[in-house]
Image (cartoon, helix red, strand yellow):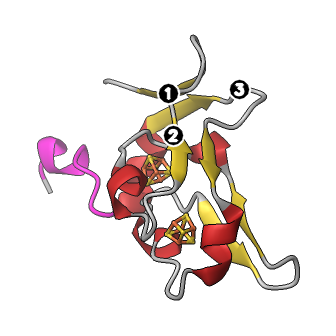
C-alpha cells in the first residue's frame, strides 16, 4: 500500500481519530424530549456519524453526548419532528480537524 493510501481513513471510526474536541460545559444540542418520546424510529440514533444520540429505555429519554458532535448539521434536517434546538458551541469549544 502506498503512503498516500495509508493516510486515507477507510471507515468513519477511523476518520473520528482525525478530529479533536474542546467540549464546552453546556450542550449546544437540545432535543424536545416530548417529541422524542413519541418519535417511533428515533432515526438520530442511527444517522448521527458521531453517535451523539442514544435512547435510554429506563429513563425514557434521549441522551445527548454533545461533547462528540462533529457539527455536521445532519440532525438539524434529519430529526423526525425538526425539534432539536441546535446552535454552534460557544467560542473556542467544539470540534476541530487535525491536519497532517
Ligand atoms: S429524531 Fe428528533 S424527535 Fe426523534 S428521537 Fe431523535 S431528536 Fe428526538
Ligand atoms: S450535528 Fe452531526 S455530529 Fe452533531 S449531533 Fe447532529 S448529526 Fe450528530
Could you say which quadrant of the image residue 51 lies in? bottom right
SS under mark 1: loop
**Label 3 crowd bin: few (<14), some (14–19), many (20+), radius 10 Å:** some
Q: CA distance from mark 3 to mark 2?
A: 14 Å
Say if disc 2 is inside 8 Å of ligand 2.
Answer: yes
**Label 2 crowd bin: few (<14), some (14–19), many (20+), radius 10 Å:** some
- Work out whether 47 lies above or below 73: below
- According to the picture, the residue beneath numbered tag 1 turns out to be 88
Q: Position of residue 57 (x, y in %)?
A: 79, 85
78 on left or right of 34: left
20 on left or right of 38: left
Could you say which quadrant of the image residue 27 lies in? top right
Q: Residue at x 42, y 71 (%)?
A: 80
Check contact, mark 3 vs mark 2: CB within 8 A: no
Q: Position of residue 99 (x, y in %)?
A: 33, 24
Q: Residue at x 51, y 31 (%)?
A: 87
35 on left or right of 16: right
Q: Position of residue 64 (x, y in %)?
A: 68, 56
- Work out whether 32 lies above or below 45: above
- According to the picture, the residue beneath numbered tag 3 turns out to be 24
- According to the picture, the residue beneath numbered tag 2 turns out to be 86
- Work out whether 34 lies above or below 52: below
Q: Position of residue 12 (x, y in %)?
A: 36, 60
Q: CA distance from mark 2 to mark 1?
A: 7 Å
Q: Main secondary structure of the magenta part?
A: loop
SS under mark 2: strand
Region in magenta: 2-11
SS under mark 3: loop
Q: CA distance from mark 3 to mark 1?
A: 11 Å
| Numbered disc in front, either 2 or 1 | 2
Amino acid at each position: 500500500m502506498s503512503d498516500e493510501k495509508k493516510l486515507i481513513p477507510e471507515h468513519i471510526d477511523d476518520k473520528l481519530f482525525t478530529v479533536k474536541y474542546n467540549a464546552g460545559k453546556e450542550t449546544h444540542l437540545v432535543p424536545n424530549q416530548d417529541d422524542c418520546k413519541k418519535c417511533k424510529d428515533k432515526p438520530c440514533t442511527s444517522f448521527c456519524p458521531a453517535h451523539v444520540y442514544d435512547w435510554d429505555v429506563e429513563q425514557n429519554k434521549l441522551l445527548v453526548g454533545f461533547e462528540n458532535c462533529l457539527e455536521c448539521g445532519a440532525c438539524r434536517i434529519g430529526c423526525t419532528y425538526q425539534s432539536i434546538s441546535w446552535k454552534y458551541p460557544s467560542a473556542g469549544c467544539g470540534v476541530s480537524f487535525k491536519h497532517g
